Image: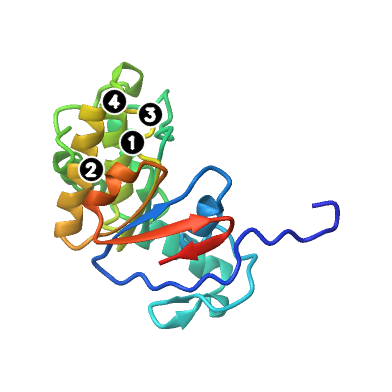
Amino acid sequence: MAGEKNAVLKNVSLVISEGDFVGIMGRSGSGKSTLVNLIGFLDKQFSGDYYFEDKLIGEYTDDDLSKIRNEYVGFVFQNFGLIETMTVAQNVELPLLYSGIPSLIKSKLVSESLKQVGLENFSNQSVKLLSGGQRQRVAIARAIVNHPKFIIADEPTGALDSKTSLEIMQLFMSLNKKGVTIILVTHDPSLMTFCTHEFKVSDGEVLI
């Protein structure tokens, strides 16, 4: 900023293994969003070593990282990130558009993904007509349509009531039991009961 570098994170050292359900806790401004941007390959501005599948991130090209983001990572956000003018199926299909997958296989993958989140009968529904919980389920279906190795969920229940939040967390647990690594970012300590590992971020430091 204005020619000066600002260190958001300091001395971070952590390991996330395949199959983990990780909770990352921290207040607004603590640095947790910066941390998950790095974990999700959205930001490369850091010093130090980050290994993904035993290979340093710096050894991947930008094209490699774009492909990894598209095929290995599913993102779920608090505001859902859906395109209002599209149907449920069209939103879920978005990660597949540049994959070169034939249309019939795309349709099958979208149907399977929607079935996993309990929305198999909503394919042609406009997302404008969905409840908050249904929208988040569509966002999760979109995140898993590529069969990602891990999901980054940034405050996925922040805009939902307690009952719907529980349903969404149970859905994440179900995906985790099927082998999907979950990285949950939240400021809600009650959600840590769903996690197998917990990291706290405070003033740019990660406390294990």
Q: Quadrant of residue 11?
A: bottom right
Would you call the spot at circle 3 few (<14 residues within 10 Å), some (14-19), or many (20 or more)? Answer: some
Q: Amino acid at mark 4?
A: Asp
Q: Are marks 2 and 1 in contact (CB under 8 Å)?
A: yes
Q: Position of residue 8 (x, y in %)?
A: 64, 58
| Along the line of sight, the residue nearer the viewer: 199 or 4 | 199
What residue is at 38 percent from the left and 33 percent from the top? Answer: 158
Q: Amino acid at mark 1?
A: Thr
Label 3: element kind: loop
What residue is at 19 percent from the left and 63 percent from the top? Answer: 179
Q: CA distance from mark 2 to mark 1?
A: 8 Å
Q: CA distance from mark 4 to mark 3?
A: 7 Å
Q: Earlier in the sequence, mark 2 or mark 1?
A: 1
- Apparent side of residue 5 relative to residue 91 in the rendered image (left or right): right
Would you call the spot at circle 2 few (<14 residues within 10 Å), some (14-19), or many (20 or more)? Answer: some
**Is residue 159 placed above or below 153 in the rendered structure?**
above
Q: Amino acid at mark 2?
A: Met
| Along the line of sight, the residue nearer the viewer: 50 or 65 | 50
Q: Earlier in the sequence, mark 3 or mark 2?
A: 3
Would you call the spot at circle 1 few (<14 residues within 10 Å), some (14-19), or many (20 or more)? Answer: many
> Which residue is label 4 attached to?
161
What residue is at 50 percent from the left and 53 percent from the top? Answer: 32
User: What label sits on residue 65 in the rendered view?
Assistant: none
Q: Are marks 4 and 1 in contact (CB under 8 Å)?
A: no
Label 1: element kind: loop
> Which residue is label 2 attached to?
169
Q: CA distance from mark 3 to mark 2?
A: 13 Å
- Apparent side of residue 148 relative to residue 32 in the rendered image (left or right): left
User: What label sits on residue 157 in the rendered view?
Assistant: 1
